[in-house]
Amino acid sequence: MDLIIIFIGAALINNFVLSYFLGICPFIGVSSKISSAVSMGLAVIFVMTITSIVSWLINNLILTPYHLEFLTIPSFILVIASLVQFVEMVIKKVSSAIYRALGIFLPLITTNCAILGLALFAQMRDYTLIESIFFALGAGSGFTLALVIMAGIREELELANVPEPFQGAPITLIVAGLLALTFMGFAGII
Amino acid sequence: MKKQVSLHYEFLKGLWEIHPIFKQALGLCPTLAVTVSAINGLAMGLATTFVLIFSSVIISSIRKIVPSQVRIATYILIISTFVTIVDLVMKAKFPELSKALGPFIPLIVVNCLILGRAEAFASKNRIFRSFIDALGNGTGFLLGLLVLGSIRELLGTKCIFGFQILPDGFSTWMVMILPAGAFLTLGLLLGFANAYTKWKKEKSKKEILITN
């Protein structure tokens, strides 16, 4: 039951994009078409899940036992950067179809603050391994959901008559604001 | 050899011409997340400026030693060192502020503004020039956060820095201190910044036409 609450909490109530503001850059950059939004979302779920496992292992097997907490930030960021490279190489080798779908989005994920934010949140809240995996799945699904909804709205927005200075990033942010208001409605479900 | 621009300009360009938030839309995650109040914006701005200045200076001073294949990893390590310093100092000296900003102090590492300036400026320019550039961009970022934080705090709680500004009769806009308010305020500010730039461009065009 706790696991379901963690999942729903990360996906809907404390949505990473709309209430923690993590991963705004891809949210604005990759949300112009639904198809690329879906690919980006899947890549993020994938990397997030692996990151949550690896960062949990590093935190609980290396950093905490040897009192190296001050190395948290450099070690997490290095792990994420090399992990993304590694995942990219594995996918390229295993399946060229998946690689073609996710390819260009994988390197972008390194600089996605949602991934590092996820690792830091899981560490701050002292999640167990299983809990942090569910947290990662929830956060990734929430990110994908927000990205796909946004892409759907933006495809419609292209037909709308937006004042010239507000085209691009400004109108995207305003729409995201309205979306954040809608997501507040989920606050009562737990 | 390209023409050297004045140091004066290197500082000023960060305040408006290539303003990190309003012109380049860099570092939006911390911008949106911490600007619930002016004081949070100020703290975040100072922390980012500190990291930006020191990492720019270090990156600029080792720019000839680092091979270009591993430069990004090197930059990230340098940046994360300074971020760790800021994080530990904040935790020791300002525990409440550190709690309010939560994971966003460690997340300065992935602030694209810092890596952006390192890659675009500090890796190609001399130490003092990089210092001035970092100072300008950091100040611009700080002012941006301060403006956003003040607007949200003023409309959300009638106060700025905890001092009441608006009269008691003003009913506060709850939405401003919620996440949605951050998106709406920044979206409107970006739009107005674009409109102002356009208006200025057209005005200077007209002036040229008249003088000719």
Image (tube, rainbow, N blue to C red):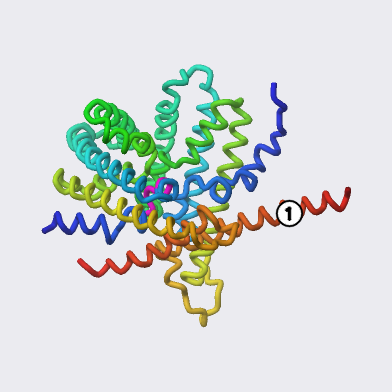
Residue beneath label 1, please?
A: B202
Q: Is residue B156 above or below residue B43?
A: below
Percent position (x, y) of residue A67? 24, 34
Outermost right residue: B212
Q: What stretch is highlighted in magenta?
A: A21-26
B58 is higher (above) or lower (below) than B92? above
Which residue is drawn at the image coordinates 69% and 38% (left, top)? Answer: B9
Residue located 49% across and 32% down the image: B55
Q: In this view, does B198 lie above or below B152?
A: above
**Camera-side residue of B164 and B68:** B68
Quadrant in which residue B128 is drawn: top right
**Could you tell me if residue A17 is visible in this image?**
yes
- Residue A71 visible somewhere in the drawing: no
Q: Which of B182 and B48 is in front in this view?
A: B182
Chain containing the residue with disc 1 = B
The verdict on residue B73 being magenta is no
Q: Please report the residue visible at 39 percent of the width from the left and 54 percent of the height from the top.
A: A151
In the rendered image, residue A27, in percent from the top left (x then y), is placed at 40, 50
Say what amino acid the circle numbered 1 marks. Glu
